[in-house]
Image (cartoon, rainbow, N blue to C red):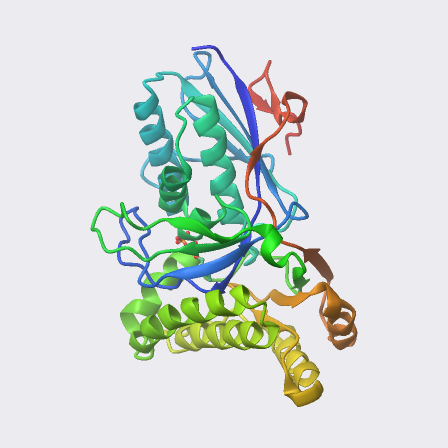
Amino acid sequence: MNSKVITALATPNIAMIKYWGKRDYTGLNTPNNSSISMTLDETLNTKTTVMFSDKLDSDKLYINGVEENIHGDNVSEKSKYIKNTLIEMRKLSGVKENVVVVSENNFPSGAGIASSASGAAALIYALNEALELKMDGKQLSIMARKISGSACRSVFGGIVKWNVGSHDDGSDSFAEMAFDVQHWKELIDMIAVVDPDTKKVSSSIGHEATVRTSVLYKNRVPFAEEGVTKIEDAIKNKDLDSLSKVIMRDSNNMHATMLDTWPPIMYLNDSSKEIVYKIHQLNDSQQDKKCIAGYTFDAGPNAHIITTDEHKEEVLTALKDVQGIKKIFESHQGVGPRILPENESLLDENTLTPKKMK
Ligand code: DP6
C-alpha cells in the first residue's frame, strides 16, 4: 500500500443527557440509556496523524508526545480497545502493515472535558481515510463507540443523539445528528476549568461500579430516556428555560447515582459546587425566574455552562468571584471531524515518531 500520512481533527462533545452505565463491558460500550449532546467547535480539539508502513515492527501510539503501551496483557482498558480497533479496521481493509498513531489534545486530557471522545473520533476518522474504507456516519459512530462510548457522538456536528439500541452486538446503538449547527447557532458552552488534572476514578470504572452498587440507578434509566425527548423539544423550540432546567436536573441526577455508588464516587469539588449555586442565583434573579443558563458536569469537577450568546456576559459576571476557576473556554457548536491538509501532520516521517517528542 502507498504510505499515506493522514491527519484528522475532532472535537469533544458535552452531553446534555448523560451516558452513565453500560449494557456491555467487554468492548462494545453499549449504554443503558440514550443520550444527547452538543459537539463543540474547534476551540478544543484533538489532532491525530496515522501512517501505515512496512518499516514498523508493531503498532505504535503516541498521545501528547508520550508513547503509550498498547501491547501485552498489562495495558489499560482504553489501550486494549484502541488496539482492537486497529486490528478490526486493518482487517476490513485488507492492509497488512503496522501503523503509527500520533495524537495531541490542545486541552487538559482526562479531566472530564471529553478528551477520550475527541481522541477516539479523530483516530477513527483518520484510519477510515488512510485505509480507504469509506465508512458512513453510522459505521464510524459504532467504531468510535467501541473505543469510548461518548466518542460515538463526536463523529457528528451540531446536536447529536445516541440511540440506546437493543441488539446484543451493538449494531443498533449509534449516534445521529438531531439538529445541525445552524438550527440554534447562538448556543454556547462556557467551560470553567477548576482542576485540569486527570480524574480520580476513570469513567470506565465508574460506569460499572454505579450500575452494580447504586440503589438509585434503576430510576436513572427511564429518567434519562425521558430527558432526551425533553431536550429535543427544548432545542426544537429554542426554549432556553426548559433546556437549562433539563440539563441541570440530568447532571445532578447522574452525580447523585455516583455519590450513591459504594464506595462513593465524587467528581465535584468546592469550586464546582460554588458554580452550581451561582448559576441558580443568576436564574432566580431573572424575570419569572426563567433560566438563562444550565450547568452540567461530566466525570470531573470542571463545569460546562450552556447558555446563548445573549447571556454570556451575565454568566461571566456570575462566575467572577468563584474561587478556583483557572480558565474559562467558550465554545459554540462544531461541525464534527475533518481531514487536515498534509502540512498539519504531527509525524516525523523519517523517524516515525512525533515531530514534537516529550
Ligand atoms: C460522564 O465515554 O468516557 O462523560 O465508554 O468507558 O469510555 P467509556 O466512558 P466515557 O463516559 C462518559 C461519561 C460522561 C457522560 C457522557 O459523556 O455522556
Q: Name the image quarter holding residue 239.
A: bottom right
Q: Name the image quarter holding residue 191.
A: bottom right
The C terminus, quarter of image: top right
Between 2 and 103, the residue placed more toward the observer is 2
Residue at 73% x, 60% y is 327
Does the image show residue 207? Answer: yes
Q: Is residue 247 above or below residue 66?
A: below
Q: Locate residue 344 relative to residue 318 in the image: left or right.
A: left
Q: Position of residue 331 (x, y in %)?
A: 67, 55
Q: Locate residue 76 relative to residue 266 in the image: left or right.
A: left
Displayed-image quarter of ligand 1: bottom left
Q: Position of residue 133 (x, y in %)?
A: 39, 25
Between 186 and 113, the residue placed more toward the observer is 186
Residue at 43% x, 58% y is 203
Q: Locate residue 223 relative to residue 103 in the image: left or right.
A: left
Q: Position of residue 155 (x, y in %)?
A: 48, 43
Q: Position of residue 230 (x, y in %)?
A: 45, 71
Between 1 and 264, the residue placed more toward the observer is 1
Q: Name the image quarter holding residue 185.
A: bottom right
